[in-house]
Image (cartoon, rainbow, N blue to C red):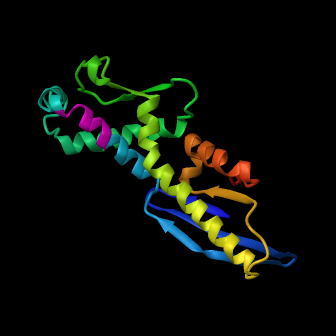
């Protein structure tokens, strides 16, 4: 099975190798696409963080405008997403990791996860919560695909079910997503791997 998680979509295909010389493959199930790519994690983080500071919106914008007079809520959201991009790839959910995002001009509001000016502290809970909607969709698509292939196998329409998921696309670079997919599939004997260069 191949999982291609890009910025906008997550696509899953399942194939079986019929022969290796010459290489011949057969599709086990029609390709499945969901619009839950890696950017959806950024959007979810943006939504959650902006909601958490919405009661201090004017104070936040006033502080940001000391650095950039054109700053508005939309632009702050875009900067949050861009800054969050790197942190989400490194997230492993091991212990209580926290990540610092830097956006010049942010105020000092420790009670709003802004411990020092220009910085946001993103704790492990917010990281997990931001990943969860995308992760739920991806795992559901994988499970639905595997169930459909198993039904086809039980009716003699295909000979085998996938025993490996090859993670392609940028989503394979997200440590947390890969780990959660492994935790879901490996107990069922399906290994999860990344392409090698």
Residue 67 location (% of width, % of height): 19, 28
Question: Between residues 33 and 145, which one lies in front from this camera angle?
Answer: 145
Q: Is residue 78 magenta?
A: no
**Residue 3 position within the rendered picture, expressed as x and y whole percent measured from the top left:** 60, 60
Asked if residue 183 is positioned above or below residue 29 in the image, the reply reads: above
**52 in the magenta segment:** yes
Residue 64 found in image quarter: top left
Whether residue 196 is visible, yes or no, is: no
Horizontal side of residue 130 vs 79, given as left or right: right
User: In this image, 141 relative to 185: left or right?
Assistant: left
Name the residue located 44 percent from the left edge and 35 percent from the top edge: 127
Residue 120's x, y, as percent?
Answer: 34, 26
Q: Residue at x 73, y 64 (%)?
A: 162
| Image location of residue 112, percent across then percent down | 27, 24
Q: Depth check: 83 or 41 in front?
A: 41
At 56% from the left and 24% from the top, the residue drawn is 95
In this rendering, position of residue 116 left or right of residue 20? left
Q: Is residue 139 above or below residue 30?
A: above
Residue stretch in magenta: 47-54
């Amino acid at each position: 099975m191949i999982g291609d998680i890009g910025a906008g979509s997550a696509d899953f295909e399942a194939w079986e190798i019929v022969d290796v010389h010459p290489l011949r493959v057969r599709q086990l199930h029609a390709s499945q696409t969901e619009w839950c790519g890696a950017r959806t994690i950024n959007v979810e983080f943006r939504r959650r963080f902006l909601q958490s500071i919405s009661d201090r919106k004017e104070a936040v914008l006033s502080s940001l405008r000391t650095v950039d007079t054109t700053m508005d809520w939309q632009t702050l959201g875009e900067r949050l997403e861009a800054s969050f991009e790197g942190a989400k790839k490194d997230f492993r959910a091991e212990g209580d990791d926290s990540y610092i995002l830097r956006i010049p001009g942010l105020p000092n509001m420790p009670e709003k996860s802004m411990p020092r000016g220009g910085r946001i502290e993103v704790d492990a809970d917010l990281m997990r919560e931001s990943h969860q909607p995308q992760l739920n969709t991806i795992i559901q698509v994988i499970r639905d695909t595997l169930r459909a292939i198993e039904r086809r196998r039980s009716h003699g329409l295909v000979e085998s079910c996938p025993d490996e998921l090859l993670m392609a696309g940028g989503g394979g670079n997200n440590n947390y997503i890969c780990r959660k997919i492994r935790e879901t599939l490996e107990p069922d004997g399906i290994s999860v791997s990344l392409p090698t260069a």
